[in-house]
Structures are given as structure tokens and as C-alpha cells.
Image (cartoon, coloured by chain):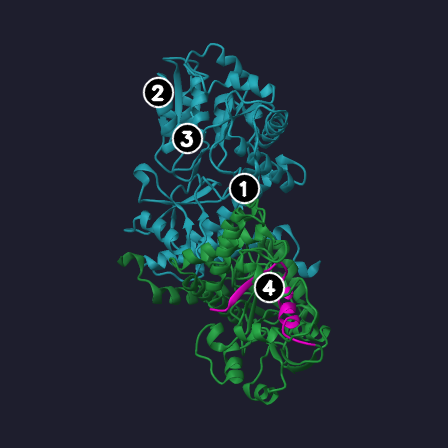
Chain colours: A cyan, B green
Amino acid sequence: MLRKTRLFTPGPTPLLPAAQLALASANLHHRTADFRALYTRTLADLKEFVGTQNDVLVLTSSGTGAMEASISNLTSLGDKVLVLSAGKFGERWRDLAKAYGCSVDVLSAPYGETFSEGVLRARLGPELRALYVQATESSTGARHDVEAIARTVHKSAPDARLDVDAWGIDILIGGSQKALMIPPGLAYCSVSDRAWRRMEDAGSPRYYFDLRKERKAAAKGESAFTPATSLIAALAAALDYVRQLGEGQIAVGREALIEGAELCAQMTRAAAQSLNLKLFAPSCPAVALTALVPPSGIDSGKIVTAFRENFGAMVANGQGEMKGKIFRIAHLGYYDYLDTIGIIAALEHVLAAAGISVDFGAGLRAAQKVYAEHSAARQPAYAQR
Amino acid sequence: MLRKTRLFTPGPTPLLPAAQLALASANLHHRTADFRALYTRTLADLKEFVGTQNDVLVLTSSGTGAMEASISNLTSLGDKVLVLSAGKFGERWRDLAKAYGCSVDVLSAPYGETFSEGVLRARLGPELRALYVQATESSTGARHDVEAIARTVHKSAPDARLDVDAWGIDILIGGSQKALMIPPGLAYCSVSDRAWRRMEDAGSPRYYFDLRKERKAAAKGESAFTPATSLIAALAAALDYVRQLGEGQIAVGREALIEGAELCAQMTRAAAQSLNLKLFAPSCPAVALTALVPPSGIDSGKIVTAFRENFGAMVANGQGEMKGKIFRIAHLGYYDYLDTIGIIAALEHVLAAAGISVDFGAGLRAAQKVYAEHSAARQPAYAQR
């Protein structure tokens, strides 16, 4: 039987076909009126996607580049910063801040867990220059509650899925290869007025990631340095798709995208429970992905290999010290029902091949029930139309 | 949740990504050395795909164009021809032969059934100029046993999946949009020495579909008329993929493609049985597709609509008088395990939404068991490697 290569990794995620077409057909020079029009429109669309009145800038780099920008543009040598860390990306924040000579205070939680409000409150103080946290710790499948963190820091944060402005998020960072359904190579960040003011006296060295240069260029419809033009064209196409999904409104499309991911996540977790697989981060599970613990004695690398070799499906192993201990399946991105039910079916075979007793269809049925209940709640049976 | 558009129709089938790239990047002039090299190589590869020593030609037309060519190039006004017909494509053979003024003898079987050897034998005779039959009657999901027909006509036909030369098939016809995994727009046909000889005194008018013109042009690496160049590039890419699948041998890759389709078909039929759905052509089921009868009282058009609206999956309604009575799911083409399990899962929801009592997961489990038995027979459990 054929085996199609399919990405179920939490980034890169599968490419949106319209974005692939845009990638393949983009033949742009970046210092032209055409490109300036495209770039200006894309930055405006991205701003609607992020849902902010702040400036939104694009960098030609991985997400780590924008992480670095948010350190180098806001800190000076010796500044005290607080990093919340409970996984590989929290540790990256720590390492970045250290690389710029910050005095780093790390509030740690065990992998797969998150931070209590009380402990966080005790670590805050006027001497802190900045606080850095990964919203979704994709290395462990945990989601840190940025809303609660914002409430602790700022004393208020309205209940919402993500409200950059009302929560007082000074810099929000994303990469192109996850929810945006395009390849890696672009990062984006929103920058608040407070962050722009703080940049004035930030003394850390920066050049390529100097956000003030990017803001100045963006005002003219340009990027400070040569941008990845084909990825900008793909980003424009992806944001058009999100707008279409929202029937004309990118913000509505973004919510639909996240709600779809939540349903994929619920299906996957119901299946995992039926198959006696444990969630790695049960107390604070992410929407974007599910991290599962293989049955005892089985290396998750073997699970990952079996998915790939038998089904062409790429799921992610754990990273660093989690390697061999968990495997991760993505939900946020260009995924639908057939993808999600397919990876669950494959999971049943992979477990059976590993010698686990599997009641074929048990996980699938649990996932179907989640889907059926959800769709029954949202739409009438077609026989009644 | 997102709904990806997916073709489960028995043509067009999903596009091979490598062929899509070739389509998008082809920027060819057809009267150049580059194109002649591509065309010559593609015809040779296609010959290996068909598995024949006969000439293989490509026409820029749908499959019906090649059907017409096999009538107009071999018959004269008033010639007696026998058409085996048990569905829409059998009827197209009849209509084509009539359009060219042939005296058409039709051996019919009910839709979903096939022809008995005894009855066929009684209809043969030296006065027949030609016999036409559709191998897979995709309108009903039936496969006519070309091997048995060849044995009846020629007294011998070695046991094989398809052996154009040994079975004495004078013209074998295919379209680009099924097993070849590229869009519609190209047809191909193999032409035997006997067929070339018969063409000498065939008096029917033909111009665009004159196979002698095509043979002459093909010898120079060209087509007689302007070809669909981008589809030729896509065909070349698809045949490269089939070769890769066969580890260097197109013939081996073709078998793998068909074996994969057989497994998809078996999974789908096991699921249908568990869900109490009847096959439409149980006595002679096709490999390329499965035609299913909806539960009594339900119009298959509603099933087709529910698949599309709820899951983005395009399955086919019946054609002509079968409209509303059956629905059809394809297996031959760019399909794998995840596709097949996904369409079965969707089928369970579609039936449930139509008011049928469905034991969620029952069809899926049946399909998984078919797959597990098959893969257990072919490969060791990965834990043992």
C-alpha cells in the first residue's frame, strides 16, 4: 500500500495547498511597488491574526530569531529578568537571556507541569526588567496560562482566548510553521508602546534583529534586510485562507482554526484514554499538540519509527532528556477530521505491533463519539434539512 | 474543524504531489529537442506501465477520445461489432459504434453483473469486425474478466493480472486521471500489429484521432497535434514515481499500486459488511472502486452531499439511472491507509446522521483487522527487528 508522507509534528505542520502554490509561483523582487503592496497588506492581515493594535513585524528567521530580538531589544547587560521554564523552550529563553549577559532568575516547574500563581507572585518585583514565558511548551505538550500570568503581573486580564493588548503582552512571538500552515523561515512579533519605549535605553547589541530598523522599514512597506519573498507570498495566501475560513474576518477564522484544533485534541485524548495511554501534561494540556507516554518499557523512538515506516506519518519524539519517553502529535495547523482519525487508527496498529494488546477500533470509537457529540451540538442531522 | 477537499471519486483521483510540481513548472514548447526527449521517454515508460511490446500512443483527450479512436480507426460503415455492456461505459461503446454506422450487436448484462462465458461464445463469429468491452465498469463498481473474455475469443490467455500481448488485446485504453494520479486530459492506448493491419482497410472517417498519424509523429518524439505539454510533464513525473515504487521497475511499481488498491478495497468492503451496507456488484467487484447501496429509503445523493459538506470528501453518486441508488469510493490511485480509514470513519458519521443506527468503530475495526492481517503476513512486528 502507498504511504504518503504526512507531518503530524508540532511544527513544521502540513502546508496549506494555496500557500504551496504561492511559494512556487512567487518570483518577486523585494524593492518593488508590487512587493511593498503585498508586504503592507500581509503585515496588516497578520496584525488582525494576532489581534492587536500594537505594531506587528516579520523577521526572516526561525521563531528563535524573534525570541532573541525580544531579549536583545529590551535588555542591557546585567538586567534582571525572570524566565518561566518547564521544558526545552523555557530553557531556550534562559539561555538566550544569559547569552546577552542578563541576570536570569528562573522559575522552574517540572516538565509537563506549569507555574502556580502564588509562587509566581512571590518572584515579581520592581527590579525585574522583563518576564519571558513560552505560551505552549511544545516540548512537553503543556500550555502555560498566559492569561493568569498576565493577571498576576498586571493585576487584570479579561477572560479571552488571547488578548495581547488587554493582557498587556509587550512582545508576542510566533513562527510561520505552525498555525500559519506555511514552511519555517519567518517569525513574527507584536510590539507594544511600552516595549518601544523600553527599547530606548536597552543597551544589548543587536543588528539583524533590531526591531526599530524593522519598524522603520515596515512603515515604507519594506523589510530592513532581504526578506524570504516566497514565504511572504505564502504567508499572504495563508492569511487569505484564514479570512475565508472566518467568512471575511481573519479574527473569526483564527478562532475557527483554534476550535478545530481543540476538537482534534479532544478526539486524540479520548482515543488515548481508551487505549490506556497517559497524557504527559494532564494538568495543563496544550491545544496545539498532545504529548503521550508510551506503554511502559517501550522507547518512544520506536513508536515514532513505526509511524513513519508503516504509515508515512511523522510524529515527534521527545526532545533532549524527554527523548524516548514521550511522542507528540500536532493538532493546530492544516489538520481535519480525516487526518486525526487516520493518525489514531495508525496509533492502534503501532501499539499492536509493539506487542501491546489493542482492541482495534476502541480508540477510534472514542474519537468518533467526541466528534459526533460536538457536531450534533453544532448542526442538525442532514436528514432533517 | 477544517475540511480538506479530498477526491474519493473513481476519476479524477487525488493528484500525486510530484506531478503537481511538474504541472506547475512545465513551461515547454512542444516542437523542441527538450520536449521530444521528454515525450520519447514518457512513451517508453508508459509502454512498460501497460506491459506490452505493442506501440503505446498518447492522445490529448479524455479516455472517450481513445475509445472513439479505437472505433474510427478499425471499422467501416456497416461493420458488425460486438459490444459487451453492463453499465454506462458499455453503453458508451455501443453509442460510439453506432455513431460510426457500425452494425452493433450488444451482449448485455444487468448493471452490477458481468457476462457468462457460454453466452459470449454463442455471440462470436467470423463476421465480427471487433469486440469492445470496458474492463472496469466504474459506473457500477464491476470488473469484467478480460482474461476470461480473451480466452473465449482467442482460445488461450495465460493467468496474469493483465497481459496485453499474451491475451491478444488489440487496443487497450486508459485515461490519465485514475491509476496514473494526474488530472484528466490525456488518454493512452496500446495498438497491436493486428490492429495496425486492420486499420489499412478501415473506412470510417477520422482526423484528430487518426492513430496512424500519431504513430508517425511518435517515432519522431512528437505528437500529431499540439499536446497538453504540462500534462505530459506530469505523466512523466507520475511514471517516475511508479518506477520508484517498484525500486527501479515500472512494472513492479504498477503491481504495487494495484496491490495497494486491492487492500484499500478489502478494507472498505469489510467495513461495509460490518455496517450492513451491500456491495452493488458483489459477484464481480472491481479493484479500482467500491460501489455501495445506501440503506433502504436513503437517496445516495444525500450520502454524497453529507460526505462533501461534513468532511470535504468527494465520493461519487451513481450515474444516469443509478443516480440516487449507489455511491462509489475509489481505491486505485494516490490512496493510502490513512485515506481509506478516514473515509470509512466519515462513512460511519454519514450513516448515523442519516438516522441509521451505527455502532461507531465497527466498520473501522473490521478494516483495521484486514490491514493488520495483511501487514502481519508481509512484515515482522517492529519489536522483533
**Helix, strand or loop for disc 4:** helix
Question: Which x, y percent locates residue B81?
Answer: 65, 80
- Tell me, yes or no, whether the highlighted magenta stretch contains residue B225: no
* Label 1 vs 3, first from the N-terminus: 1
Q: Amino acid at mark 3?
A: Ser
Q: Which residues are magenta?
A: B53-76
Mark 2 or mark 4, which is nearer to you? 2
Query: Which residue bears the numbered disc 1?
Result: A20
Pick the front one: B59 or A120: B59
Tell me the distance, in whole angstroms, between the alpha carbons under discs 2 and 4. Answer: 59 Å
**Helix, strand or loop for disc 2:** helix
Whether marks 3 and 4 lie on the same chain? no
* Label 3 vs 2, first from the N-terminus: 2
Q: Is residue B253 above or below residue A233?
A: below
Query: Which residue bears the numbered disc 2?
Result: A99
Tell me the distance, in whole angstroms, between the alpha carbons under discs 1 and 2. Answer: 36 Å
Residue B175 appears left or right of B157: right
- Tell me, yes or no, whether the highlighted magenta stretch contains residue B59: yes
Residue at the spot x=39%, y=36% of the render? A113
Q: Amino acid at mark 1?
A: Gln
Q: Amino acid at mark 2?
A: Ala
Whether marks 2 and 4 lie on the same chain? no
Residue at the spot x=57%, y=75% of the render? B197
Query: Which residue bears the numbered disc 4?
Result: B351
Provide the chain ID for the residue under circle 2: A
